[in-house]
Image (spheres, rainbow, N blue to C red):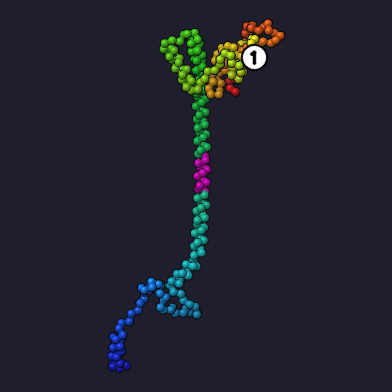
Amino acid sequence: MTRSEDDRDEQEAEQRGPTIRDKRRIDPQTYQVREPQTTAAPAPGGGTSLSPDEHLTSGDSASGPSDAAQEGSEVTELKAALAERTGDLQRLQAEYVNYKRRVDRDRDLSRNVAIEGVLRDLLPVLDDLRSAREHDELGGAFKAVADEVERVAGKYGLQTYGTQGDAFDPHVHEALLHAHVEGIDGPTCVEILQPGYRIRDKVLRPARVAVAEPAEPNNRSAAGSEFEAASDEPADQTGP
């Protein structure tokens, strides 16, 4: 090529201006992704080579199902572990509730047994106070002490029972004297020799009474006779 041809090519290039190659992937006017301007060379063996984006997409599609399966397996394992821990917690809570109930029941039972023992030992004292009151021997400070002892005993559930005229019940009464009397319909407590004591439904000591039964038609002459010692067995002190 001669010098004149080189000058001519330079002049033509200056007239055309600089060559600009727009390699932006986003079209500035339509904001769409441009197609690649160059085509990759065919892969050896007649295959088609893939662009980096196509390789990424292909890799994602190939690994997608296995990743999803793995995630599903992990979720299943987590759900199974959560169900197991929840079951353990529920069983532990049930065991604690049962334990607390047993402890409360045993504590109440021990407390009641202790109270019953103290009140049972206090019964002779209450009998003496009752006898002194019947003979008008309570007065002054002694009467105040007696009232306080009876109040404390009642506070812990001790109850006195046995009234003249009550129907005789061998479960709560102990017959010490027996007679036949007219004008009654059945065995009746005609005299309370010693009152009975109970705490809640448990009899600590049965009421000791004199019992009268209706006089038999063929033995009315014996009606109203003196009381005789009863041969009945003592009442069951454990209550009904």
Q: Residue at x 58, y 20 (%)?
A: 237
Q: Is residue 234 visible?
A: no
Q: Amino acid at mark 1?
A: Asp
Check the image and name the residue furthest to the right: 218
Q: Nearer the viewer, residue 87 or 39?
A: 39
Residue 57: image location, x then y, percent: 46, 69
Q: Residue 96's x, y, as percent?
A: 50, 39
Q: Could you say where residue 122 lies in the image, as x and y percent from the top left? A: 50, 17
> Magenta stretch containing residue 88, yes or no?
yes
- Name the residue at 49% across, 78% down: 47
Does 184 sit above or below residue 59? above
**Mark 1 residue element:** loop
Q: Picture quarter containing residue 53?
A: bottom left
Does 139 appear in magenta? Answer: no
Q: Is residue 84 visible?
A: yes
Image quarter in which the C terminus is found: top right
The residue sitting at 53% across, 24% down in the picture is 200
Left-right relation of 123 to 2 = right
Task: Report the side of 170 relative to 51 (left or right).
Answer: right
Viewer-side residue, 215 vs 48: 215
* Region rendered in magenta: 84-95
Neighbor class of circle 1 (other Cα within 10 Å; few <14, some 14-19, many 20+) is few
Q: Position of residue 1 (x, y in %)?
A: 32, 93
Please name whichever residue, 172 or 69, is drawn nearer the observer in this view of the structure.
172
Q: Is residue 175 above or below residue 17?
A: above
- The chief SS type of the magenta part is helix
Residue at mark 1: 185
